[in-house]
Amino acid sequence: MTRFPDPTRPLRIGTRGSALALAQAYETRDRLMACHGLSEDAFRIVVIKTTGDRVLDRPLSEIGGKGLFTREIEEAMASGEIDIAVHSMKDMPTQQPDGLVIDCFLPREDVRDAFIAPDHPSIDSLPRGAVVGSSSLRRRAQLLHRRPDLTLVEFRGNVQTRLQKLQDGVAVATFLAMAGLSRLGLAQIVRSPVEPSQMLPAVAQGAIGVERRLDDEMAASLLAPINDRPTELRVRAERAFLARLDGSCQTPIAALAELTRDGLKLRGEILRPDGTEVHAASRQGSTSDGAAMGDDLARELLSRAGPGFLAGV
């Protein structure tokens, strides 16, 4: 069993304060407890409010991109206020600050988007001109590509807030991640899961990553046994694709890596925000080549799209 240098000081786990973020932090804690034979009092959950949690009246694309949900947490880790941090990997920038690393991933949940609509069973059943709420540029672009007749409105907030907006008539439908709803025990509200063939998910959707200080050998030894290697292989391929595209919350980008009998298959796409132009391709290769496949796939799509495609976003 791995022991702390000082058994009187619990391992401090940093997280956002939403119900989903806390569920992910508790899952990480529980896996560490089970793996190392530790009790709950060996850990302390530390809630850190991020800019993305505080600013809810504007689209994410207007206020700074993916770092909105991680900056304050990473600052707390760098200053020694927390020991590890639990993140939704789809919120993570492709580059970590100097001295921090993510090398532990929990088993990935359902990667699909969830279609939520009280009165409509599927996207295709929505009437012409129906109002759909979403804060995701990717989902908005994919939906407009498929259904350009729909009206899209901004839809931010936690799960309960978005469901209330549906009840209040702000929109007739919205989308959430199946993974988050499953972790919250709310899968029953899903009208229908959206298959990746219809809407390719966000990079690393459904994956949880645990960040630590690079020089923290104790944290490294605690986390290594709970790392899920298949999830790591998939996420690293997808994030290599994102890194080459320099993707952020301001760019409609989707990707999904899946393990196959022969190795790894990676699909990716880039879109214009209004859905009028989509470029998609795939790669198949060895699991050890995932990062190279992601980089190469991104280069192909950039070549197809031409200069300025992403800059125009």
Image: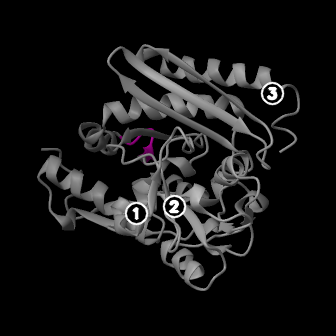
Q: Nearer the viewer, residue 37 or 2?
A: 37
Task: Quickly name the residue at label 1.
Answer: 181
Residue at (75, 70) in percent of width and height: 58
Circle 3: residue type: Ala
CA gap, disc 2 and disc 1: 8 Å
User: Which stretch is magenta?
Assistant: 209-216
Residue at (74, 66) in percent of width and height: 129
Residue at (26, 44) in percent of width and height: 222
Circle 1: residue type: Leu
Circle 2: residue type: Leu
Residue 204 x, y percent position in the rendering: 50, 42
Q: Nearer the viewer, residue 89 or 282?
A: 282
CA gap, disc 3 and disc 2: 28 Å
Residue 233 x, y percent position in the rendering: 41, 28
Q: Is residue 257 left or right of residue 307?
A: left
CA gap, disc 3 and disc 1: 34 Å
SS assignment at label 3: helix
Task: Quickly name the residue at label 2.
Answer: 176
First in sequence: mark 2 or mark 1? 2
